[in-house]
Amino acid sequence: MWPWEHLAFGYVLYSLFRHATGRSPTGPEVFVLAAATQFPDLVDKPLSWTFGVMPTGYGLAHSIFVAPVLVAAALLVATRLGSVMWGAAFAVGYLSHLVGDVVYPYIEGDALSLDPLLWPLVNNTGAAPEAGSIELVVYYLVRWLGDLLRLDVGLLLAFELALATFVFGLWAYDGFPGVAMVVRPLRR
């Protein structure tokens, strides 16, 4: 999944969770959520793509064996800071990333596999890329933009566009949480 797809998926889940508790997400919660939806890739991709520590970008931070420890730590820290919902935002964002990394390849037609989440029991195969992180991100982005410019609108791209539209509508319904935190300092 692309970073914005992880964010969109996490936002939908967190917003639904918050509405189930009778509230909308707050700005600080959305910022924690946004960071958490990116966290596994921000740890594991550089470990593989830049430093060659892991054979692929699915390792330590993608592991379902490490996830409970990180979620518990986030909930503990958030509780100490006085907002357990920040911990909940981290938990939903982080765990949604892991779910997305399993479901997304399945949507693309691959077999359903939990292998990316089973490190260190399953050391995902694949040689460490020779290019660094920036080069690989640019490569994948150019490839994605090429599909978009060719109007190669397959089922997956149609789903992504529908998800983006839905998430924007949900964010609007929630009152655009997070925008005021960015705009307010700019007005000063």
Image (cartoon, helix red, strand yellow):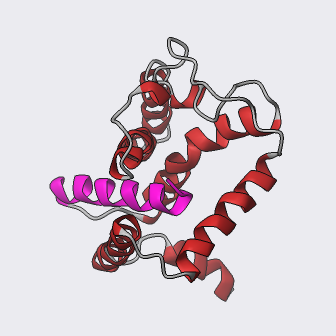
Along the viewing direction, whichever of 75 and 10 lies nearer the viewer: 10
User: In which image quadrant can residue 71 be found?
Assistant: top left
In reply to whether residue 72 is colored magenta, the answer given is no
Would residue 7 be counted in the magenta stretch?
Answer: yes
Above or below residue 84? Residue 144 is: below
**Image position, residue 69 (x, y; %):** 47, 21
Extent of the magenta region: 1-22
Q: Quadrant of residue 163?
A: bottom left
Give the residue displayed 38% in from the left and 30% down from the top. Answer: 113
Q: Residue 37: x percent and y percent?
A: 49, 49
State the residue in front, 19 or 146: 146
- Left or right, residue 22 beside residue 54: left
Name the residue located 35 percent from the left edge and 73 percent from the top edge. Answer: 158
Residue 75 place in picture, x, y as percent:
42, 33
Residue 72 is situated, as x and y percent measured from the top left of the image, at 43, 26
Foreground pick, 119 / 167: 119
The quadrant of the image that shows the C terminus is: bottom right
Q: Main secondary structure of the magenta part?
A: helix
In the image, taking residue 145 as reference, residue 96 lies left or right, namely: left
